[in-house]
Amino acid sequence: MGQNARKREHRDSYITVDWLVLLVTCAALVLLLATTLRTPVEGDPEGRDGFRELAAHETLLAYQDFTFGAPGWRPDATSDRLPGLGPVLGPFDAEPVQRSFPIPADADHVRLSFDLHLIGDWAEQGGLTASLNETELLRVQMPEGTTSAAEVEATQSASLSASAHAERLIPRQPEDALPGSAPEITILRVRIEMSDPPETLTLRLDAQVDGAAQWTLDNLTAVAARNDGVAMP
């Protein structure tokens, strides 16, 4: 009798272990299914780094995160040694910086987006301007006596618009051997849109600064599109 009871207990213990394995397997399958299925994201698909999936009527003119240098820019200096930032174009102070973009003949619309980083003490400096084909689109200044907020003047018209959203970045305290000791950086996420673009667009940035104030540029995206939805070549 006692031997038969022990056998039943032995069989029951194996049945319990089998059920446990089955439950764990089912849970793993549910988790795998949840990670495989994705819910579409509504709204603007463009990410913070400027990358987005293009539609058939759009074509990518340029995308640069400056990991592999800065072809097309004058000057083309880059750096990956600024605290809190990856590879960037710059840093620059008062020298003008520009790049030109050939525009497809059938393009009806062009969109440029990029990040500007204001590094150092920009209070009471002359500010920074962004121009497209010699038309000033954006002017950025810091209010006198503060470095905590940026004043942005942007152009808006029927065929041309510009906008900039300011954020603050507080990088970790840099080592003494590294350049760029500013404890905070102002990030301006810039977006420029133009209808009926000419054959060539030239983006130019100028800063009226002195002292330790500098700026860099990152995450450049340039996209051309047709308004009729026809695929771009």
Image (cartoon, helix red, strand yellow):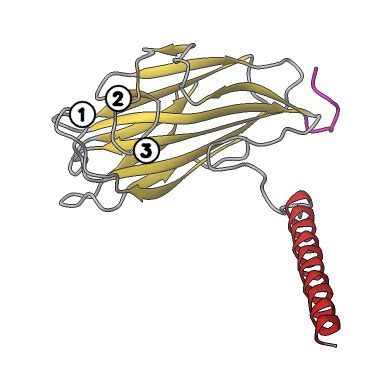
Residue 155 in the image, given as x and y percentages of width and height = 48, 40
| Tag count | 3
Q: Do the residues labelled 2 and 3 touch (CB within 8 Å)?
A: no
Residue type at mark 3?
Answer: Arg
- Which one is earlier in the sequence, the residue at label 1 or at label 3? 3
Q: Nearer the viewer, residue 124 or 77?
A: 77
**Residue 139 bears which disc, if any?**
3
Quadrant showing the N terminus: bottom right
> Mark 2 or 3, which is nearer the eye?
2
Amino acid under label 2? Pro
CA gap, disc 2 to disc 3? 19 Å
Decide if residue 224 is on the left or right side of residue 125. Answer: right
> Residue 91 got which mark?
2
Secondary structure beneath label 1:
loop
Seen at 57% across and 40% down, the residue is 157
Q: Residue at x 20, y 40 (%)?
A: 182
- In this view, the residue in front, 75 or 41, is 41
Q: Are marks 1 and 3 in contact (CB under 8 Å)?
A: no
Percent across and percent down for residue 62 are 59, 21
Q: Which amino acid does label 1 sit on?
A: Leu
Among the two numbered marks 2 and 3 on one chain, the one whose residue lies closer to the N terminus: 2
Q: Is the magenta stretch mostly helix, strand or loop?
A: loop
Circle 2 packing at 10 Å, graded few (<14), some (14-19), many (20+), is some
Distance from the alpha carbon under mark 1 to that under mark 2: 14 Å
Could you tell me residue 98's position as x and y percent? 42, 18
